[in-house]
Every structure is written in C-alpha cells, then in structure tokens.
C-alpha cells in the first residue's frame, strides 16, 4: 500500500491506496469525482484528461502515487465561484458535443490549450486536440468552441 | 494491472541498486508506454522504481558544441526549450510531434530511448546525430546502443542519465505518422555531422531503428532530394504489419528521406508543413 497526499481542486487529500491505483480510479472511486471519464483501456481517448501541476495529462495513464505532492484539477474544479470556465461556457454555447462522454476531457485539454495559445489557429487547435477522441461530432463544433473559449478568456 | 510495489527513488544510486538486485523490477519514468503495457497485463513487474523526479536526470545544456539533455526531460519541455530550438531545431520539432499533448506532458527522452520502440521518434535522432547515451555506469555510442526492436545495450540496473548530442551542421526529421496512434509508419532523420551525413530510419525497420547506408553515401556528395530519388530501399529490410506492407514502408522511407533532404537543401516539398507539425 502507498500513502499519498495530493491536492485536488484546491483541497488537500491523504489516503492509503494500492500501489497500482491509477489517478483516474482514485479520483472517481475514492473522491467520487466522476466527471473524469474513462473511455478506453488503451490510453488513447483522452476522456480522463485532468491537469497535474497545470499540465493536461491522461489520468488513466498515471499512478496516483506519481501524483504525490502534486496539484490536480478536474472538470469539477474548473468553474470558479459559480462562474463557468471559458472552455465550459464555449462548449455549451457552441454545442460542441452530442453524447457528452468525451466532453470533460475535451474541456480540460481546451483549458490548457488556450492558456498556452491565447489566440489559437485552426491548425494549433486540431494539433492540440490530437489526444482527445470524439466519436459523435466530427469535431467541427469542438474546434469552434475552442476558438470561442479563447475569445471568452480574453474578455 | 497485476499488483506491484511502487517505489519513488531517492537517488540514482538507490534506483540502480534496486533494479540491479531485482530482475523483475522496472524503472518508471513518464510511463507513457509502461503503464498502458501494464494495463493490458502484458508485463508483470515486481516493483516500479520511479526515477522521473531525480535531479541527476534533469536539465538541458548547450556547451562546447554538445547539447546535453537529462533523461527525465519531458517531450513537451524538449519541444519548448529555447536551448534545444537554437541548438538542434530538428530535435525540438521531433519532440513536438511525438504522440499527443498529454503524452508529451508526461513522456521522457530517456524513457523513449530506453524502451527503443521500433516506431518511436527519438531513436532516429539519437542514431543520426551520433549521440552518446550516458548511463549511471558508462557512455554508449549510438551505433552500439540500439540492438534491435525493444533491445538496447542497457544492462539490468543500468539507467540512462542523459543524452549528449553533438551539434550537427544541419539536421531535419520527417515522419509519416500513423493517423490514429501518431507513431511513425516511417520516420527519417538526416544529420550533417562532423563524421559525415548520417541517415537514421525509424518505424519501418524489420529490426528497429537503422542507418540507411545507401542514402548516406548518396548524400555525402551533397544533400538534395534528387540524390534520394534515385535510390530504392530493399523491402526485405522493412517490417510488415496490419498498418502496411514491407513495400509500402520502403516507399514511405524514401518519400520521408526525400522530404528531409529537401528541407535541408532549402526546398520545401508538398506536405512538408504538415509533417513538421
């Protein structure tokens, strides 16, 4: 068993977990933060994307033990004081989803992307979303939403 | 995943000790290959020794004509490093094209080179640039280091500490990524080095990364796309899987080599922008 301490959405958590526990499973099963989705078993889909120390990572491909001492932000921690994050607002406004399963991961990746590229080009958006799969939309509204998120962030 | 013990190494010595004593223990760096492998139950290590946080494995330095990158440096950090971009732009460009953003935020140079996946990008750069793989025990020349698919000169308990890339006069990397995985279907790294032009091919070799001798000879007289266009890579030297036949890969290698050579001679061929990401 591994003893771990990490911050999730601003709150300090300590727990004793099996060494092999994935960050995604810890978030979902221990902390009941089920907004982080697990969409595949092969580390390809990106639905489980969260931020670890400010960077977008696949939480299904990281042991929670590796996140010891880190600051994790999940989709539940993105809105501040009841105000949606620009990425959340833009995905709603542009209807950048159909079934919505991939959306938490898409939004977490978008939030990181518009931080690095405040005015992303279409190419940067497509390149930046390479680690996130959507099987419904064909990505058109997702790309629009990322652009819109960048605009909203600038306001 | 099967159960294992996780151990965060406190020093390089400690990590080397544990891994040297327990043959079934594995080092863990970014985990971008190892963790998916464990999830599929394709490996069953006794312990994972986490070396990603070791200070000895960090840092990027350009000194005396050699770019040295710590083994635990993440792909995203290599791609964004001003030092790398100035010293060997092709290497920064290669790092920016590995996998996807989430993978680049975790995966490390040392992990990729230690794993030596036959379709990974970094091995081609290490080989073409005639780099030295510096471990906790010795220095290994790139030509001696790669020994076939997933096989390297590393011994049990031996860990990559950093990789030293002598600065080339010029270098370029072009790959044809698999559209789903981003792995190279064929990737060609051409470097104009002090020891002559070196051409390393990843993604296509029947036994992992290799140097394409005919292309090196053809480019020795001057780097141009035309010099590559005359060549044919033997399909027998290429691998075959559900993604492509030997013949297809041999052709892809030639096209990627042509594009890399064109980039080096100042000409951009169609598709170049996309390939460079």
Image (tube, rainbow, N blue to C red):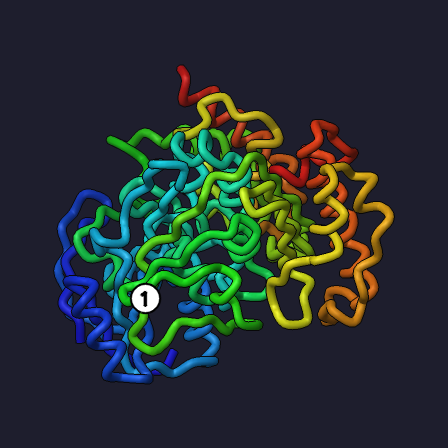
Identified at 62% across, 50% down, the residue is B198
Q: Position of residue B171 (x, y in %)?
A: 59, 39
User: How many labels sit on residues?
Assistant: 1
Q: Quadrant of the C terminus of chain A?
A: top left
Would residue B123 be visible to someone looking at this image?
Answer: yes
Q: Mark 1: which secondary structure?
A: loop
Would residue A101 be visible to someone looking at this image?
Answer: no
Q: Position of residue A32 (x, y in %)?
A: 28, 60
Would residue B121 be found to the left or right of residue B131 on screen?
right
- Residue B224 falls in image quadrant: top right
Q: Position of residue B33 (x, y in %)?
A: 46, 65
Q: Position of residue A1 (x, y in %)?
A: 17, 76
Judging depth in this view, the residue of A124 and B74 nearest the camera is B74
Judging depth in this view, the residue of B115 and A51 nearest the camera is B115
- Residue A76 falls in image quadrant: top left
Identified at 60% across, 41% down, the residue is B192
- Residue reaching furthest right? B230
Judging depth in this view, the residue of A137 and B52 nearest the camera is B52
Would residue A20 be found to the left or right of residue B217 on screen?
left
- For disc 1, the chain is B
Would residue B196 be found to the left or right of residue B74 on screen?
right
Mark 1, other Cα within 10 Å: few <14 / some 14–19 / many ≥20: many
Q: Is residue B24 above or below residue A15?
A: below
Question: In this figure, which residue is indicated by the disc labeled 1?
Answer: B159
């Amino acid at each position: 068993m591994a003893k771990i301490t990490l911050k999730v959405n601003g709150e300090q958590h300590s727990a004793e977990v099996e060494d092999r526990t994935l960050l995604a499973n810890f978030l979902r099963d221990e902390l009941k933060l089920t907004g982080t989705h697990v969409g595949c078993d092969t580390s390809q889909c990106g639905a489980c994307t969260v931020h670890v120390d400010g960077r977008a990572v696949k939480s299904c491909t990281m042991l929670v033990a590796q996140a010891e001492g880190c600051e994790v932000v999940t989709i539940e921690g993105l809105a501040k004081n009841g105000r949606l994050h620009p990425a959340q607002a833009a995905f709603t406004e542009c209807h950048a989803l159909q079934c919505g399963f991939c959306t938490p991961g898409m939004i977490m990746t978008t939030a990181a992307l518009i931080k690095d590229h405040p005015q992303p080009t279409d190419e940067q958006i497509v390149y930046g979303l390479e680690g996130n799969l959507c099987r419904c939309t064909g990505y058109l509204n997702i790309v629009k939403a990322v652009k819109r998120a960048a605009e909203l962030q600038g306001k | 995943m099967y159960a294992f013990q996780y151990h965060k190494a406190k020093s390089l010595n400690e990590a080397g000790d544990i891994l040297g004593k327990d043959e079934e223990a594995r080092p863990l760096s970014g985990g971008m290959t190892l963790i998916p492998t464990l999830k599929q139950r394709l490996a069953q290590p006794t312990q994972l020794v986490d070396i990603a946080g070791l200070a000895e494995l960090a840092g990027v330095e350009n000194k005396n004509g050699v770019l040295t990158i710590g083994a635990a440096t993440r792909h995203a950090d290599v791609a964004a490093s001003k030092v790398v971009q100035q010293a060997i732009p092709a290497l920064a460009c290669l790092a920016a094209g590995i996998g996807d953003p989430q993978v680049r935020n975790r995966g490390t140079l040392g992990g990729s080179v230690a794993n030596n996946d036959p379709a990974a990008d970094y091995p081609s750069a290490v080989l073409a640039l005639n780099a030295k793989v510096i471990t906790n025990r010795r220095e290994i020349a790139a030509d001696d280091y790669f020994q076939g698919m997933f096989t390297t000169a590393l011994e049990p308990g031996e860990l990559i500490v950093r990789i030293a890339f002598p600065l080339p006069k010029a270098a370029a990397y072009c790959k044809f990524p698999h559209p789903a995985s981003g792995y190279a279907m064929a990737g060609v790294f051409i470097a104009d080095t002090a020891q002559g032009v070196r051409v390393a091919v990843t993604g296509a070799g029947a036994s992992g990364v290799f140097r394409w001798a005919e292309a090196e000879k053809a480019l020795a007289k001057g780097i141009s796309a035309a010099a590559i266009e005359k060549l044919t890579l033997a399909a027998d030297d290429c691998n075959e899987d559900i993604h492509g036949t030997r013949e297809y890969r041999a052709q892809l290698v030639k096209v990627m080599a042509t594009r890399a050579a064109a980039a080096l001679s100042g000409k951009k061929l169609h598709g170049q922008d996309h390939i460079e990401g």
